[in-house]
Amino acid sequence: MQAPKPFALTPGEPAGIGPDLCLLLSREVQPHPLVAIASRQMLAERAALLGLDIQLLETGPGQWPQAPAPAGALYVWDTPLGAPVQAGQLDPANAGYVLQTLTRAGQGCLDGTFAGMITAPVHKGVINEGGVAFSGHTEFLAELTHTPQVVMMLATRGLRVALVTTHLPLREVADAITPERLERVARILHADLRDKFGLAEPRILVCGLNPHAGEGGHLGHEEIDVIEPTLERLRAEGMQLVGPLPADTLFTPKHLEHCDAVLAMYHDQGLPVLKYKGFGAAVNVTLGLPIIRTSVDHGTALDLAGTARIDGGSLQVALETAYQMAAAGSQ
């Protein structure tokens, strides 16, 4: 029987809470082998600061784990820092280190070493200060995997929300919602719900852009000119796309009860609802990649690094989601 592939875990910004989260979760046995791609010395120092007795087990190419680490242990693929780390204090000298951990994880997923990757939060600002143009995990992994279009989806128990546009000024959103973009995003969402989540016929609710989904053209024409014609073409192919619906009533139990995901037009249309429902227990999933990538739904929380006053719920959900996606994809 073939040994299970390990999952890669990147602790993100070394001065943030990512290392703390990785150490805290290692107190219990994971259902699958897990490899932290990080500085072993940094993790040892953080464990001492937190008062955790965690055994850091060496691993790497040619000696990948065949089984989960025991409780109180964590497999680590040692990756050298650019500079010593102090919890809570950013240092641009470690920008290259953070990107190296992501590169190792992404390449390992591409070449079949890892079953998927789970990422703790990075700090975009300090990476840019380190001299590297960096807009986020999603864009970095899209470039690494040569993927022309990716889709951001956040999920918590009972709700998945994908976005047509992500980090755009609100002034630019309407122009960015073109038939081509909407079609690409809808196709990616539909395909990954089917192939990576095991949903044979996913049902997707689609938000309108304008209040009341345009009110028949009285509050905007994007629904009439762009959204509805695009959805109609895709429905003709058999996709179950419901909408465009007014966003202020779409997120109600009556509508959500029988849907597999919501497709929102812009960042702050869909994500406030999801984060209200499940902040701290939600996961960020990058759809459209040829690999599995999940992440926490929060930032680096520099003020909490090294204090043990953190909640690992989001990382646990990110791990569980990656495991479920890998299992669905292997069926």
Image (cartoon, grey):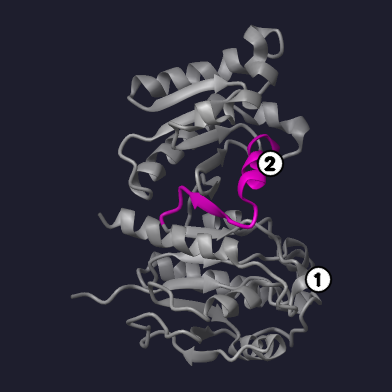
- The residue that label 2 is drawn on is 272
In depth, the one of 241 and 165 nearer the eye is: 241
Element carrying mark 2: helix
Look at the numbered discs 1 and 2 and tell me whether their residues touch, using CB distance below 8 Å. no
- 276 w.r.t. 170: above or below: below
> Up-down: is 173 above or below 313?
above
The magenta stretch is 267-290
In this view, which residue lies farthest toward the front? Answer: 253
Viewer-proximal residue among 303 and 254:
254
Residue 303, numbered label: 1
| Residue density around tag 2, few if under 14, some if 14–19, many if 20 or more, within 10 Å | few
Instruction: Residue at 66%, 75% (x, y): give it.
Output: 96
Q: CA distance from mark 1 to mark 2?
A: 23 Å
Crowding around mark 1 (Cα neighbors within 10 Å: few <14, some 14 to 19, many 20+) is some
Is residue 247 among the parts visible in the rendering?
yes
Q: For the residue labelled by badge 1, is the local secondary structure a helix, a strand or a loop?
A: helix
Magenta stretch encompasses residue 270: yes
- Disc 1 residue type? Asp
Q: Nearer the viewer, residue 109 or 180?
A: 109
Q: Nearer the viewer, residue 175 or 29?
A: 29
Residue 68 placed where, x, y %? 38, 80
Q: Quadrant of the C terminus?
A: bottom left
